[in-house]
Image: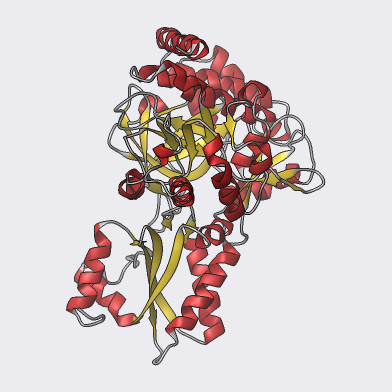
């Protein structure tokens, strides 16, 4: 028996018992979290403008429940562009005490805007500590899985992250959040962490996967953590390099996969072909803005929101009263605290965090599957986007790229849509583009569109070299798009053609095109 592993497993089991006994209600956890955030930031420029002292007093001494009404009346809702243009740009330029105390040294780069390739999301020391704390809790949650062997806790953790070789911008460092966190990994965890700091610093993903592959046989891996597409690619490389049947031939003790970033379901079949036996899958919700939720128990439908560790959550009912047809938030939006939500309804997520985000619209939509436990599933985005393997392609990216290509080629493009499709063992994007002109060079559209999207979106550029293996383009007359809308009774008015086709609509769309002669049967 592995003595250290046995003691650790017992400690994990005991910590879960204690945590369950001491846990306050989700409302109380959130109330306390907001009080801590307001107290910490009350002397910042943001805190002074919005009277955080007064809001803190309403939590400590006001009538029960009144604090939230005062908070949402006092502080406006922000999206990225609004909070960056009004506040975050100051701290990015080196100013102190803007939205959070002190000077912010780290910024996570996150794709998604139409104006530039990346957002700059502040990552404070407090946020780094909060993410580490939640990561440890996720490991502790393994105590709920009773059949794990004692010595599993002595095995290696392979964490496939962004580069720890961050960009030095004089007054701050910037890079992938996972790279920022790995760079600050706790000392006690380093013996377990793979692939180690040297490989983690590698910026070229292809080279990083090759370096890991060459020394993979030297490690005894029990846990893997990462985005499904990258983990699948890595396992395929390792299996081919060592000429074995499954990844368990190299890592016989591999038992746990913690995944996040995109839905795992499209990967499951291909992924499990690489295994000799099933793994335990743990879903996580780690965004550049913070560690939001993770699966805490076997068989859970959703992930449990982290309500007591540096993030205050609000929820906007995702309906026509609060958002228009493009997913843009309307004035006088209704917002709710965690005790006011309902199971089965879709909500857009607002965050106030220990990185100086305040009532920040992260852009994700969620649904509660267990309100008592605070368990959610991610249902999509407030605005349409496409992310099969981490490319995070927004409609803003799509619109900008189409505009640029049509201008370059002298085309009149009124309508387009894109869908994600399987392509071999990986994925492709299939574009349907409506043009007025005849005899269009489809191959030239494809090349120019692909290049422009890579310029506009860093994540897309990375995934095009690996998991996103092809771009397909079908040119159609614009009338095809309007005819489909008419067939749905949605021609005219405020109805708009979907920019992203997902799920059953893809087959419906293709079936319509075939039956009406726009594409071959």
Q: State how the image is colored.
A: secondary structure
Image-based side of 469 in relation to 290, left or right: left
Which residue is outermost to the front? Answer: 243
Image-based side of 183 in relation to 382, left or right: right
Who is closer to the viewer here, 278 or 173?
278
Who is closer to the viewer here, 183 or 28?
183
The residue positioned 46% from the left and 33% from the top of the image is 314
The image shows residue 201, relative to residue 141, as above or below, that is below
The residue positioned 69% from the left and 32% from the top of the image is 100
Q: Whole-percent x and y of residue 196?
A: 64, 36
Which residue is outermost to the right? Answer: 170
Classify the position of the C terminus by image quarter: bottom left
Q: Quadrant of residue 130?
A: top right
The image shows residue 200, relative to residue 85, as above or below, that is above
Classify the position of the N terminus by image quarter: top left
Who is closer to the viewer here, 329 or 387?
387
Q: Whole-percent x and y of residue 265?
A: 33, 46
Q: Whole-percent x and y of residue 409?
A: 52, 85
Image-based side of 223 in relation to 173, left or right: left
Which residue is outermost to the bottom? Answer: 439
Q: Quadrant of residue 50?
A: top right
The residue positioned 44% from the left and 44% from the top of the image is 364
């Amino acid at each position: 028996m592995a003595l250290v592993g046995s003691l650790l497993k017992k400690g994990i089991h005991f910590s879960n018992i204690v945590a369950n006994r001491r846990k306050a209600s989700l409302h109380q956890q959130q109330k306390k979290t907001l009080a801590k955030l307001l107290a910490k930031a009350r002397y910042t420029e943001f805190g002074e403008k919005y009277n955080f002292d007064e809001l803190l007093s309403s939590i400590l001494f006001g009538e029960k429940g009144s604090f939230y009404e005062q908070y949402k009346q006092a502080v406006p809702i922000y999206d990225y562009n609004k909070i960056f243009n009004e506040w975050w740009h100051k701290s990015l330029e080196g100013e102190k005490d803007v939205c959070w105390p002190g000077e912010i040294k780290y910024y996570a780069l996150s794709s998604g805007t139409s104006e530039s390739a990346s957002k700059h999301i502040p990552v404070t020391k407090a946020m780094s500590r909060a993410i580490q704390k939640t990561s440890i809790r996720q490991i502790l949650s393994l105590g709920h899985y009773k059949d794990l062997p004692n010595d599993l806790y002595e095995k290696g953790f392979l964490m496939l992250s962004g580069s720890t070789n961050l960009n030095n911008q004089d007054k701050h460092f910037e890079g992938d959040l996972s790279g920022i966190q790995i760079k600050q990994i706790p000392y006690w965890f380093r013996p377990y962490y793979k692939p180690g700091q040297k490989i983690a610093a590698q910026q070229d993903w292809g080279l990083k996967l090759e370096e890991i592959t060459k020394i993979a046989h030297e490690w005894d891996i029990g846990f893997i953590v990462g985005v499904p597409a990258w983990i699948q690619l890595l396992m395929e490389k390792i299996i081919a390099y060592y000429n074995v049947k499954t990844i368990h031939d190299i890592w016989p003790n591999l038992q746990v996969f913690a995944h996040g970033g995109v839905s795992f379901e499209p990967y499951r079949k291909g992924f499990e072909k690489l295994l000799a036996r099933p793994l335990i899958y743990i879903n996580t919700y780690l965004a550049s803005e913070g560690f939001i939720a993770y699966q805490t128990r076997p068989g859970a439908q959703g992930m449990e929101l982290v309500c007591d560790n540096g993030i205050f959550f609000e929820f906007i009912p995702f309906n026509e009263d609060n958002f228009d047809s493009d997913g843009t938030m309307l004035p006088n939006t209704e917002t709710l605290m965690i005790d006011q939500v309902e199971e089965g309804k879709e909500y857009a997520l607002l965050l106030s965090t220990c990185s100086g985000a305040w009532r920040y619209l992260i852009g994700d939509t969620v649904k509660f599957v267990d309100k008592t436990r605070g368990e959610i599933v991610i249902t999509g985005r407030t605005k349409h986007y496409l992310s099969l393997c981490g490319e995070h392609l927004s409609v803003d990216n799509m619109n900008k790229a189409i505009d640029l290509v049509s201008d370059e080629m002298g085309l009149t493009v009124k309508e387009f849509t894109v869908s994600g499709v399987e392509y071999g063992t990986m994925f492709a994007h299939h574009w349907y583009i409506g043009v007025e002109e005849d005899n269009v060079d489809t191959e030239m559209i494809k090349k120019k569109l692909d290049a422009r999207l890579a310029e506009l979106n860093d994540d897309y550029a990375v995934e095009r070299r690996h998991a996103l293996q092809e771009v397909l383009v079908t040119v159609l007359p614009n009338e095809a798009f309007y005819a489909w809308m008419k067939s749905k009774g949605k021609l005219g008015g405020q109805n708009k053609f979907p920019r992203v086709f997902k799920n059953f609509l893809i087959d419906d769309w293709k079936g319509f095109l075939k039956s009406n002669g726009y594409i071959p049967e």
